[in-house]
Image (spheres, rainbow, N blue to C red):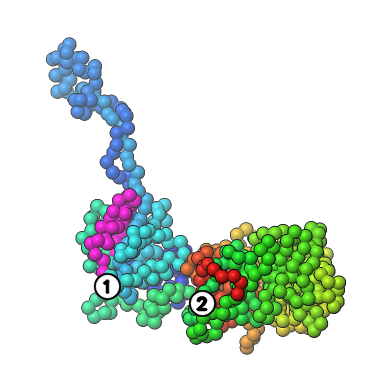
Amino acid sequence: MQLPEALRPWRQWLEWFAPQHLPLFADLLGRLNPLLGPLRGLHQGGVPEPDGLGDLHRRGPYERLLSSEWLLADEVPDEFLRRAVGGEHMFLAPQYRAREANRLIVVLFDAGPLQLGAARLVHLALLMLLARRAEEAGAQLRWGVLQGKPELHELDSPAQLKRLLEARTYEVVSDDHWLAWRDALADQAAGECWVVGQRLPHIDPRVCTHRVQIARSLDGRSLSFALASRRVLLPMPDAQQAVRLLKGQFDDAVHTPAPSATGRVARVALTLPPVISGSGNYVALRLLDEPGMVVIKLPHKNQKKALEVRRRLWGKHEHVFAATFHYRSLGAVVGASNHLNFWNIPGLGFADKPSREDMHLPPGTATFLPAVWLRGQQSERLYLLDTQGHLAYWQGPRHAPKGAGVVVTRDVLGMAQVDALTLVYARSEGGQLVTYSAWADGEKTSGYAVGAAAGVSQILFASTAHWEYAFGGCALLTQHGTHQSWRLVTDDSFPAKKAQIDLAPGWKAIGLHHQVGAQERYSLVLLGPNQYTIGLYMEGRQQVLFTTSAPIARASYCPMSGLVAVLTTARELCVFAVSERTMRMQVLCDLKQESANG
């Protein structure tokens, strides 16, 4: 994001907001910053503590007079008196150790009815100013809410700003609130303690170093910001913009409430990603307490009835290697000892587990292996890609011995289903990456070279109609330090022209989205470096799609349906439609199940 020179000190916090909000915060930051004054607590403060003896001085209390001087008083009293009058006596001087200043800045906000509305936006601006103040001094910033539990929070993500906005209450700050905080801060020894609000109780100045009063003018056209003897009037922000910010809508995302459907969803594991059906109607998650998956049907808009939730279980002692959908049916590859079980996939049943040379299938993998389940007119076929680049398929008994596994090829870098009947994969051949298409009844013998294989560590495929007869579009990853660089190869750029996309440090692409409209557009679906954000890179511009209230543990993207599904550390499942920019579902998956498989 390009910022004016005056705003660059607060760049890391302003990046959380869409460009249209920057003028509002530029005005607030510019007006408030000169009022803050110098930072307290940087000098060595407190009462010096003795730390042994230091030098000899000509002055001092007589209890620290040198012993030799007292001997002179006994032997030659007149000389002792003369030396006393002339200031020639020698005294021991103690060595002092100064207490180091505390480098903690604490700010407590009034979240009550007197601070509702535009005053909360001033809270956000002040919090960013103090965060910069702490950073410049090598200090730490912590914030809390006066009416809340005495608990301090960091400012490390936009989720913390939203947390402050959501802390609104209709309770006015009382003396009891302040006393609870005063006791809690007794052990913190903050260098600065800011208290922000209106009609604040009597506050001990030895604990509170800065008292800020924010009040609305009588005519309602401005806000008054007062700190000690300094005061400034702030204009009221645009009402529509203020409402959006107060709702926590900081970015460019289209914020549509998730459907209000309710339902009980079993507790799920955080170690495996969501599995999305190509039709865009179902999402499956690995159960935490049982050997199986929970399948959730995505609700319709304005759905009032409970979610349709099913639990599908396999054998207690079987390990799951992969899970995939065929329309509404969920299938999986599970195994125990020396056999594989193609669970819920008609016509496949059991098979001998391939040797390690043919397929690397370790139990307890950190993620699902890529798998595609295709159904032809006369056969079922399950494709599986292992961690070593070996691609194999198992086919129904009409075209092969029952349970026989066929290794298609090696050196495969990626695979994806691009429509109901087709999968594509890319393999390295003679230093080039070549893409191929396959169906339930066979695969193409000729492919499309999309670029050099050297340095490419990942490939993403777009779901387009072009794959039916030609090349459909992909993106190739090369990693450079902390940032990803992608080569975008589309049907109209193939085979010559390729777009280069360099992502900001820490951002990762998890999918390649294709949107059909007046013109075809390809975009990268992104996971943010703070693990709270899902974004989109499209036509040279990066934007935020949505943010979560807890860190994202696992994220999946389905190119066929255009859905992103994320599972947070709080076990909240969020499903977002990229093309429509709408949240399809938000549901907590943390309830223990008491019954058997339903």
Q: Quadrant of the C terminus?
A: bottom right
Q: What amino acid does circle 1 point to?
A: Leu
Q: Answer with the quarter of the image where residue 234 lies.
A: bottom left
The answer to whether residue 487 is visible is no
Q: Residue at x 79, y 58 (%)?
A: 356
Density class for disc 2 (Cα within 10 Å; few <14, some 14-19, many ≥20) is some
The answer to whether residue 332 is visible is yes
Tell me: 492 left or right of 236. Answer: right
Q: Secondary structure at mark 2?
A: loop
Density class for disc 1 (Cα within 10 Å; few <14, some 14-19, many ≥20) is some
- The residue under label 1 is 114
Q: Residue at x 21, y 28 (%)?
A: 59
Q: From the top left corner, tell me how far across and down residue 318 is, in percent.
A: 69, 63
Which one is earlier in the sequence, the residue at label 2 or at label 1? 1
Residue 448, placed above or below residue 288: below
Closer to us: mark 2 or mark 1?
Answer: 2
Tell me: 110 left or right of 372. Answer: left
State the extent of the magenta-drawn residues as a range. Answer: 172-196
Q: From the top left corner, tell me how far across and down residue 213 is, in percent.
A: 26, 66
Q: Is residue 210 magenta?
A: no
Residue 382, placed above or below residue 146: below
Q: From the top left corner, tell me how far across and down residue 402 is, in percent.
A: 83, 72
The front one of 300 and 552 is: 300
- The residue under label 2 is 263
Q: Secondary structure at mark 1?
A: helix
Q: Is residue 192 magenta?
A: yes
Tell me: 557 left or right of 125. Answer: right
Q: What amino acid does circle 2 point to?
A: Gly
Report how far apart the C-alphas of labels 2 and 1 lie in the structure.
Answer: 38 Å
